[in-house]
Amino acid sequence: MRSAAGHRLLPQVLPRSTPGGPVEPRLARGAGPRGGGVHRGGGCGHGGRSVGVGRRARGARVIEIGARPLTLAEVAAVAREGASVGLAPGAHGRMAASRAVVERTLGGTRAVYGVNTGVGVLKDRVISADQVRQLQINLLRSHAAGVGRFAQPEIARAMLVLRAASLAHGHSGCRPAVVEALLALLEGRVTPVVPLQGSVGASGDLAPLAHLALVLVGEGEAWLGDQRMPGALALRGAGLQPLALEAKEGLALINGTQFSTALAVLACVDARRLWEAGLAAAALSTEVLLGSFQPARPEVQVLRPYAGALEAA
């Protein structure tokens, strides 16, 4: 049964189980991702295009990124149902134009934070032209310092689509290949292993995003189907190639709040479903008990400026 807004009523809210047994909802030490089919596709390496790897069901909806904000339902569909994601028309060109600005900067003598300088207390240290790529890898490795239990794979998948969507707007100086590589992980069912502890989201979810980004370059750990393995093996198993980062791209991958946002989005979706289940239960109980629905009459509700009360009525 669904509400007028299209949300499913009376949802299943029991904890999910994994090959290792029951786990608490969305938190696990060793839970594999839901599903597990591996899509074989082309590489996502340096300069290559990878959108569309994997086979999509004929007529299946593709959620587009790079033109508008994603909805909560769209993020949840990618994270939990494996919905396909693609670039909106014009997104590729906007990213390319943004990248051109970075390339022009690299051709000059100007020091730009995180591009040809260190970060944090090393912001005044200029990085030589032959080391700017290595700086990006070092940023990922040094910030991948998360600890504790692992986030449920659906959280990591939400992080992937949220980070890809942010970069796809073309304001971060990344090549299109970076976003395409993130989408290739989603299509190939390669899910980064992300520790839950290590970020407060104040200056970006640096540690969780670093763990996520390491898989792009063939490091870190990931789930492929129900198997946890080194990131390089997961990429190989999905028919993908490691991404070679260019200047600024490592910083762009970790300087965001997609870990916190992923948690918040899925919590909001779950809260909405629970609210609708409670609402359905209340309505059915009132009906069974021959209660009065007069308090829910529209002319009564419009006297109060509460959208939630109107919707419930």
Image (spheres, helix red, strand yellow):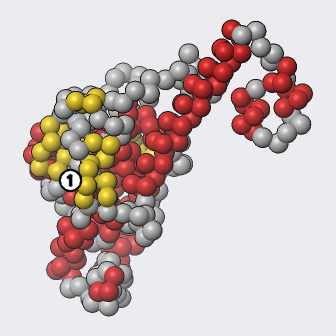
What residue is at 53 percent from the left and 21 percent from the top?
10
Give residue 127's quadrant in the image: bottom left
The C terminus, quarter of image? top right
What residue is at 85 percent from the left and 39 percent from the top?
304
Residue 93 in sight here? no
What residue is at 48 percent from the left and 48 percent from the top?
264
What residue is at 32 percent from the left and 80 percent from the top?
119
Q: Position of residue 20 (x, y in %)?
A: 19, 32
Residue 275 in sight here? yes
Mark 1, residues whose alpha carbon is within 10 Å: few (<14), some, or many (≥20)?
Answer: many
Q: Nearer the viewer, residue 7 or 306?
A: 306
Q: Nearer the viewer, residue 302 or 288?
A: 288
> Is residue 142 toward the left or the right of residue 272 in the image?
left
Provide the secondary structure element on which disc 1 rests. Answer: helix
Q: Position of residue 182 (x, y in %)?
A: 30, 49
Give residue 144's quadrant in the image: bottom left
> Is residue 178 toward the left or the right of residue 309 in the image?
left
Q: Amino acid at mark 1?
A: Val
Is residue 50 placed above or below 126 in the rendered structure? above
Q: Furthest-front residue in view? A: 289
Q: Position of residue 215 (x, y in %)?
A: 20, 53
> Is residue 193 toward the left or the right of residue 75 in the image?
left
Give residue 126's quadrant in the image: bottom left
Is residue 62 placed above or below 50 in the rendered structure? above
Is residue 139 placed above or below 159 in the rendered structure? below
Q: Position of residue 145 (x, y in %)?
A: 24, 65
Per the image, the residue denoted by label 1 is: 215
